[in-house]
Image: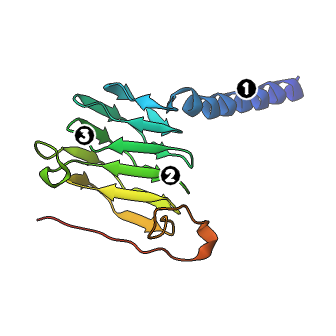
Amino acid sequence: MKIARVLVLAFGASGLLLAGVGTAAAQTTFCAGGTIAAGDYVYLAVTGPCALPDTGIVNVSKSLTVRSTGALNGVKLSTLNVKGNVFVKAGGVLSLGCSEELGCSGPSDDHIGQSVRASNALAVILHNDTIGGGVVVSGGGGGLDCTRAPPSKGRRPMSTSRTA
């Protein structure tokens, strides 16, 4: 009798653990191409060429990930709010934020609650963004002639600009 109860408790607990694993995947919205609609998302994963809308607000309550096949064009006057982190995986591209220098009619107002973290990303371009944590970019880049080079070729040049 006691063994049966222990087994039921063990299977019940493992079922709860498995349910927790599936929850994050079920709450992830994928963009494989096109414009991301203004609205609220839990997790957002960019797996193809995607763009923020021209106007409106995109809220992400957890994290945004640009995967190796993804590119996010966020050079728009819309607003992106991510409460958690933004991750850019190897080969991914992130351009976020707008300014008059980029041809926009004014500055954007994007907010990242935690950090931007990129590892071997093809490009990470940030303009007029509020970032609550740090920005960590390690490796990546496409070289000086815009051709894609394998990450194993060593360090790539990186350029940053900062406006007051």
> Residue 92 has which mark?
2
> In the drawing, what numbered circle is on residue 100?
none
Q: Amino acid at mark 1?
A: Gly
Q: Which residue is mark 1?
A: 12
Q: Position of residue 126 (x, y in %)?
A: 29, 56
Residue at x 37% of width, y 36% of height? 51
The N terminus sits in image quarter: top right
Viewer-side residue, 150 vs 147: 147
Identify the residue at horizontal 43%, vertical 36% (top origin): 50
Other-residue count near label 1 (Cα within 10 Å), few / some / many at <14 / 14–19 / ≥20: few
Q: CA distance from mark 3 to mark 1?
A: 48 Å
Question: Which is more N-terminal, label 2 or label 1?
Answer: 1
- Left or right of 46 in this view: 97: left
Left or right: 17 with respect to 87? right
Q: Which residue is mark 3?
A: 76
| Cα distance between the residues tagged 1 and 2 | 40 Å
Q: Residues within 10 Å of mark 2 (few under 14, many from 20)?
A: many
Counting from the top left corner in percent of width and height, residue 24 is at 55, 33
Q: Position of residue 161 (x, y in %)?
A: 24, 67
Q: Nearer the viewer, mark 1 or mark 2?
A: 2
